Image (tube, grey):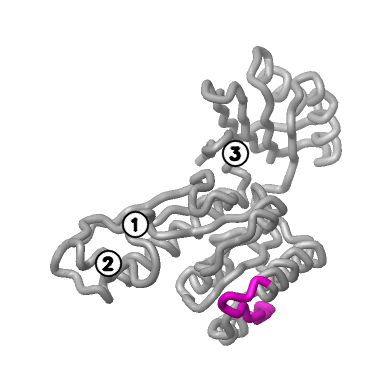
Amino acid sequence: MVTWQCPDRAGIVHAVTGACVSAGGNLTELQQFSSTDTGRFFMRLQVRDMTSAADLTAALRGIAPAFQASVSVDHLGRPLRTLVLASKAPHCLAHMLFNRDAGRLPVDIVAVMANHPDLADLAAFYGVEFEHRPIVKGSSKSKEEFEQAVLDKVEERDVELVVLARYMQILSPHLCEELSGRCINIHHSFLPGFKGANPYRQAHERGVKLIGATAHFVTSDLDEGPIIEQNVQRVDHSQTVAQLTAIGQDTESTTLAEAVRLHCEHRAFLDGRRTVIFR
């Protein structure tokens, strides 16, 4: 599987496909997009029957400088080494772990780190390392220590992706920068309308008709990073706060898992403040 991005110009597809053929590759899928907003070109190819992955990589890197291109070659379906950050809510983590075991989500979850101990049993049930590091409210030191532990874990375990599975802490600009392009978060769609605690109760009180969730890359702009996936469910006045919460949590879980899948299959490209998604 090949991903390619560069400034848009003529001749890119011809050159890239030619390089794949020169390495003995047979193209089974090709998706491309030219961004008129940023002038960037994006392409994703699935290649089989090549002489070797090393030969394919060499052929593509041989032409990349002429196009000022960034190119990567990976095995389709290879699980990305993933670190999950969590707090108390289990729904997103449980959904990811179940779908990992079911073979639906190409992730190798190396550890779960949380600022509360509540999810230790869930992680243990799925055989995943769990590390609890408390963050004391109002203590910048404990938060800095937690974030440094995250960076240490990323380096020690060769982590490729960090997922915030309802991790209820705001990441520092430093950590956002360190994890740029490889950290995914999920939040309900009520923001910025219903901030703070009990958003589903607020939604119930206001008679909300749609409940949704947004998964996005993390940036220092809180909950405003490039969007990867969104979903929405229709609700009505007859549903209780508990029912709205259940619908919302299910939507959050599936939306986050789909965003993670798209990223792990190299289908999500950053294009300025937005993403290009090849489905």
Q: CA distance from mark 2 to mark 3?
A: 33 Å
Label whose residue precedes the other's in the sequence (2 or 3): 2
Three-letter code for the amino acid on which mark 2 is drawn: Gln
- The residue beneath circle 1 is 190
Residue 246: quadrant of the picture:
bottom left
Q: Residue at x 62, y 35 (%)?
A: 44
Label whose residue precedes the other's in the sequence (1 or 2): 1
- Identify the magenta region: 126-140
- The residue beneath circle 2 is 202
Q: Are marks 1 and 3 in contact (CB under 8 Å)?
A: no
82 versus 3 height, above or below: below
Disc 1 is placed on an element classified as loop
Three-letter code for the amino acid on which mark 3 is drawn: Leu
Three-letter code for the amino acid on which mark 1 is drawn: Phe
Residue 188: quadrant of the picture:
bottom left
Determine if the magenta segment contains residue 6: no
User: Would you say 88 lies left or right of 181 here?
Assistant: left
Residue 65: quadrant of the picture:
top right
Magenta highlight: main SS: loop
- The residue beneath circle 3 is 270
Q: CA distance from mark 1 to mark 3?
A: 24 Å
Determine if the magenta segment contains residue 136: yes
User: Would you say 165 lies left or right of 188 here?
Assistant: right
Disc 3 is placed on an element classified as strand
Q: Residue at x 68, y 26 (%)?
A: 6
208 versus 97 height, above or below: above
Residue closest to the far left: 238
Q: CA distance from mark 1 to mark 2?
A: 9 Å
